[in-house]
């Protein structure tokens, strides 16, 4: 299967509410259409994760932030454009996504992806993608495909075939909480 066929197949499955195991621009993730509450609930169940803990969503462009955040602080654009490594920002005023992904305080964690595969999937899907580490809650994060447990692999609807052999161990993104006044707190270095 070519990369373009893989992207199309993944998008078709996501549109049907399926869950995929896929390579993000950081680590391998479990994902679904972030607007599909049934699919989001399946991921919480698969991970055995408390649904009060929100998950990250991925977008393909900085311009799409305004579609999912009530008010994007201007500093967010600078932080994203100037970050040398992947950065996830927690914003106030989440909108237009599954309510299950919005934290109790109304926030949502969003990362603009740089990876070619993931960005193209999101672009063709036309919606944000859920991204959560490919592990059961409480277990170590699998930095590479070979470290993902069979327990996770057996519960997803599809596993992307490309990039499985990549062995570089990439760390999850830095996570910061951004206030509307521009102040921010680092939650995960």
Image (cartoon, rainbow, N blue to C red):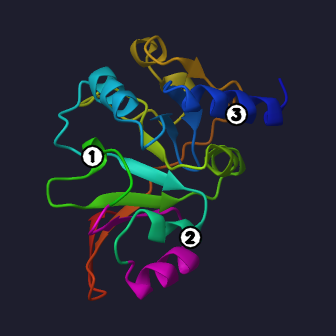
Q: Which mark is residue 90?
A: none
Q: In the drawing, does residue 16 fall left or right of residue 124?
A: left
The residue depicted at 47 percent of the width and 35 percent of the height is 31
- Residue wearing tag 3: 163
Above/below status of 72 relative to 155: below
Residue 182 position, x and y percent, is 31, 87
Q: Which mark is residue 99?
A: 1
**Depth check, front residue: 120 or 176:** 120
> Magenta includes 76?
yes
- Residue wearing tag 2: 62
Residue 60 position, x and y percent, is 60, 58
Camera-near label (1 vs 2) is: 1
Camera-near label (3 vs 2) is: 2
The residue depicted at 50 percent of the width and 84 percent of the height is 78
Distance CA(mark 1)–CA(mark 2): 22 Å
Q: What is the secondary structure assignment of the residue under circle 3? A: loop
Q: Which residues are magenta?
A: 72-94
Above/below status of 65 relative to 11: below
Task: Check disc 1: other Cα within 10 Å, few if <14, some if 14-19, many if 20+.
Answer: some
Residue 173 position, x and y percent, is 44, 56
**Depth check, front residue: 115 or 19:** 19
Task: Check disc 2: other Cα within 10 Å, few if <14, some if 14-19, many if 20+.
Answer: some
Q: In the drawing, does residue 93 fall left or right of residue 121?
A: left
Task: Check disc 3: other Cα within 10 Å, few if <14, some if 14-19, many if 20+.
Answer: some
Q: What is the secondary structure assignment of the residue under circle 2? A: helix
Residue 20 position, x and y percent, is 53, 27
């Amino acid at each position: 299967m070519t990369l373009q066929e893989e992207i199309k197949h993944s998008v078709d499955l996501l549109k049907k509410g399926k869950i995929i195991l896929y390579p993000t621009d950081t680590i391998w993730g479990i994902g679904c259409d972030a607007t599909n509450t049934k699919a989001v609930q399946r991921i919480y169940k698969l991970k055995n994760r408390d649904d009060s803990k929100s998950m990250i969503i991925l977008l393909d462009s900085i311009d799409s932030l305004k579609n999912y955040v009530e008010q994007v602080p201007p500093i967010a654009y600078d932080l994203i454009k100037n970050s040398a490594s992947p950065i996830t920002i927690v914003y106030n005023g989440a909108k237009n996504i599954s309510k299950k992904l919005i934290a109790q305080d109304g926030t949502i964690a969003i990362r603009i992806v740089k990876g070619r595969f993931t960005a193209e999937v999101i672009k063709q899907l036309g919606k944000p993608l859920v991204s959560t580490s490919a592990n059961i809650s409480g277990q170590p994060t699998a930095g590479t495909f070979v470290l993902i447990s069979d327990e996770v692999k057996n519960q997803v609807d599809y596993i992307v075939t490309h990039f499985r052999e990549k062995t570089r161990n990439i760390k999850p993104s830095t996570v910061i909480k951004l206030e509307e006044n521009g102040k921010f707190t680092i939650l995960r270095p």
